[in-house]
Image (spheres, rainbow, N blue to C red):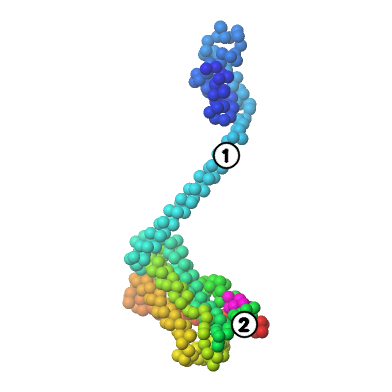
Amino acid sequence: MNKEDWLDYFEAINGREPSAKEIAEALATGEFQDGATTDVSFEESSSDDTVAEVVEEKEASSVETEPIAYPKEQTPLAHSNNTANSKQQVEQLKEKGKNYLSWFLEGLKQPVAESSNSQFIYGLITLFLAAVLLAAGLVNYVNRIFTSIINMTVSGESLKLKEPETFSMIEDAIRTNFGFSKVIVVTLIIFLAYAILAVLPAFINKFASKSQENVTELLGKYVAYTPLLAVINFLILVVSFFTSDKLVVSSKYAYQIASSFETVASSPSEGLSSVSRLIKEVPAIHSIQTVCVYLTILSIISLAILLVAFLKNIKVSIGALNNFYVTLISLLVFILIIFFMDKLLLSNLLHGLDSLKDSLAKLF
């Protein structure tokens, strides 16, 4: 074919005009005959090789002096590359999610204190998830108790029906002091205790046995129990919703119930004692006690998981202390960590009660 036909063919296929370099390469490979554009004198007297050399020299000088201009039609390629990268990232994220789920289910089916494979990131995520679930369960339990008090029905009347605006203001005060912000604070306290209990065995084994593995690798093996811990804490959250958020009581108990829970903030022991007596007398608030028992049992199971994993992962002797003494000391350390965690949690919840009282005092 001649040059004009080849140019039309190239535009039809690629949607753009060819560059000078592409024309020269096509001519050199014999894709077209340049009989229409060369001089008439050369048409009869020159051979194809001579024509090719002349064109190549001319086009080579043109390529050296003129930059290659890429047409606008090529810009969608960048967009397609970005789309491909996004799809690849999504696929990688899905793959990581599947791997995490497989690891989680395996840890749930066959929980161990130490796994053969180190999964530091998976363990850290699950440990934080367990802390969030436990914090949400505890805060939700307290929130529903106070919501049931303000949603109390006495002799067929309730604050919610008689004074909906007042009820709404009190409900907002409860949510402010025992809502999302409280869950965050309680989560941080619990996660700090969880993290210490997970990291201590890794540090002890690293430096006592002079292990070649770094702390994060050891920690990744020592968090294989976290899926089971997260599931137990999830059950704590679920059980907390069994607490009734409304009460139906007779008029003679209404004031006692409100004052008893108010006393908890100023004098926890006296307030809890008063609440315990009321639970026996008032069937309507019996669910508070029932749920409290379930939460206590699940919390003990949760602590047992932590304790077993903590002690089993400490398997070294330190100096003159054999493994028995090291385990005994580790048990005392565990008790101290849990003690301070519970103390911080109780202090934080009581502070929430004080803040709630102050909020109600400002409203009324």
Identify residue type, mark 2. Lys
In the image, 345 versus 105, the foreground residue is 105
Image location (x, y in percent) of residue 160:
59, 80
Q: Is residue 2 visible in this depiction of the protein?
A: yes
Q: Is residue 324 left or right of residue 128?
A: left
Q: In which quarter of the image is residue 306?
A: bottom left
Which stretch appears magenta? 168-175
| 359 displayed left or right of 49 | right
Residue drawn at point x = 62 percent, y = 24 percent? 62
Q: Is residue 90 above or below residue 320?
A: above
| For discs 1 and 2, the disc positioned in front in the rendered view | 2
Q: Does the rendering let one see residue 269?
A: no
Q: What residue type is labelled 1?
A: Pro
Residue 82 versus residue 351 in the image, above or below:
above
Tag of residue 162:
2
Determine if the magenta segment contains residue 171: yes
Which corner quadrant holds the C terminus?
bottom right
Residue 324: give x, y in percent of width and height: 32, 77
Q: Main secondary structure of the magenta part?
A: helix
Q: Which SS class for mark 1? A: helix
Asked if 252 appears above or below 172 in the picture, the reply is below
Q: How crowded is mark 2: few (under 14 residues within 10 Å), some or many (20 or more)?
A: few
Who comes first in sequence, dot 1 or dot 2?
A: 1
Residue ID for mark 1:
76
